[in-house]
Image (spheres, rainbow, N blue to C red):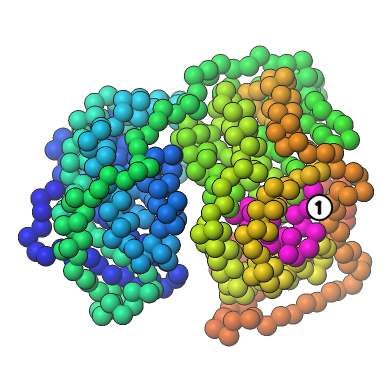
Amino acid sequence: RHPRADPPMATVLVPVREQRSVTVTWCLPVEDPDEWWRAKPDSTVVSLLSSRAQGGLTQLLKAKGLASSVDGSIDEFTRSFVVLTAYIGLTPQGLQRWPEVVSALFSYLALLREEGVPPHVYAEERRMRELAFAFAEPAPPSSFVQSASGNLFLFPPREWLRGPLLAGEGAEPLVRSILEGLTPQAAVVKLTARELAPLATRVEPVYSASYGEMPIGREVAAWSASPRLDGLAVPPPNRFIPTDLSIKALSIKARGASTAQGGGGGAARRVKPALLLNTDSVRLHFLQDERFGRPKAFAFVSLRTPQLYESAAAAAQAELYAALLSDALQDVTYQAARAGLSAGASVGWQGLSLSLSGYDQRLPELAALVADSLRTFDVAPLAFERQRDGLLRQLRGADKRQPVEQAAYRRNLALETPRYTNEQLAAGLEKATLPQVLGLQRRLLPEVEVEALLCGNVAEGQATQLVLKLLNALGSRPLPVARRPVRRVRVLPAGERTLQQFVAASQAEVNSATEVYFQVGGDEADDWVLLTLLSQLMSKAFYSELRT
């Protein structure tokens, strides 16, 4: 916490892989470790630094095109000190203006010190930890022992189970103390980027990493008087925090979908989803929980359309749209994620898939938020270029993947249609423009076939209402049967051997791989379950024998 005596210097590190970041680290004293571990003030500070909600540091820096991510973390925790780090992923422009980025960090910390952390932040932190503990998924014994053993010295035996997860009262003064210690004078700054190679004049002897140092005395002085920035604000209350944790009564259809197999009161039960909606364009499968008794639900919605895979160019633009959407959803649904909800989206040859999960009370609100975002989320030019650059790097680096991945890729190309090569997708991305992606967003899903599964603590009416509200928000027309996406699989000649051989594209590759593929027939009934089970049994035997 005390200013260093030596002139302030920043460490410069040249990474092996493409990376641009600045990290700011502090070592803070822990005066009363028992109180810290009970109240967990460090967890509150980390969540404030990592916040993607409106008013947070992430939103500000991304809007300016300076950063791609902001995360806080606790790197070390002992009975006498804690090491806290703010990690900021930089854009190329952010690397050039990195002192401005760090200045924004200290401006945000000054705001939290001056205005104080609102009481609802502490209450929400405690509440969500209580819910996470109450409804935690059981962990394998070995995993639990490994995670719990590292915390045994921190808590008395009576708190070994609850202590690491729950947060008690009294975090407010400790958070204020932490914020007072997060000063420019006490910070250790590290810059990581390949562009900084000219400044990396030293080589670390163990890992041969190139690094260097540069003076930051003027920057530290400027950061000490960082101006208040428009757009930064303390976090608002989280409207997604659940308040209704009641378990829904089992519906008639749910009872009918679960039928006993065999005789006797202890007979095994076959659980089968009920079909609540079954029209030409919408099918809704429904499975109400009658076993786990948790106030949670899951929704998976497949929005089938040929629009997103009609050509290599369309597929490339769709992948770019999906990357931008996923990034936007992290911001749009951040408060929901803090409240135990999650949302995801992906594209493929069938169309667009959405997944929603978490506490069932707020699931309809989350679905409405995601549906509204599909055509309305902002696409900034810098975000477009960042995501396109990242996808292009993935595609161009695909030939450097492990040979076993290359074998699966070549097999799929040979057997499935439509399917596009990495080169075709890369060419489509290179030609993709921001107006094209914005046009795709506006025209998204003009016609659609919907298949959805809702399961968990949800009633029939709620499940039907959620899907219908989603469809109303989209406003899509039913997709004609003749236009529904189909992927065909080439049938291999029975009893004959088909051989494909390829030389690795990378001359530096020293490994090789052999893939043996068996085609066993059409996809009928539950054969895929039996094949999955057989695959699990075979893989363990192969791994145990071939590895040795």
Is residue 420 or residue 291 the one in the foreground?
Answer: 420
Question: What is the quadrant of residue 348 in the picture?
Answer: bottom right
Quadrant housing residue 189: bottom left
Residue 354, given in percent of the width and then of the height, sits at 66, 42
Q: Is residue 264 visible?
A: no
Q: Seen from this angle, which residue lies furthest left?
A: 5
Query: How many numbered markers are drawn?
Result: 1
Give the percent coordinates (x, y) of residue 171. 25, 30
Q: Is residue 298 in the magenta section?
A: no
Q: Please report the residue visible at 29 percent of the width from the left and 55 percent of the height from the top.
A: 102
Residue with the mark numbered 1: 306
Based on the picture, tell me whether residue 311 belongs to the magenta stretch: yes
Q: Which residues are magenta?
A: 304-323
Of 514 and 108, the residue lying toward us: 108
Residue at image position (22%, 37%) is 113
**Is 108 rendered above or below residue 399?**
above
Is 511 in front, or is 24? 24
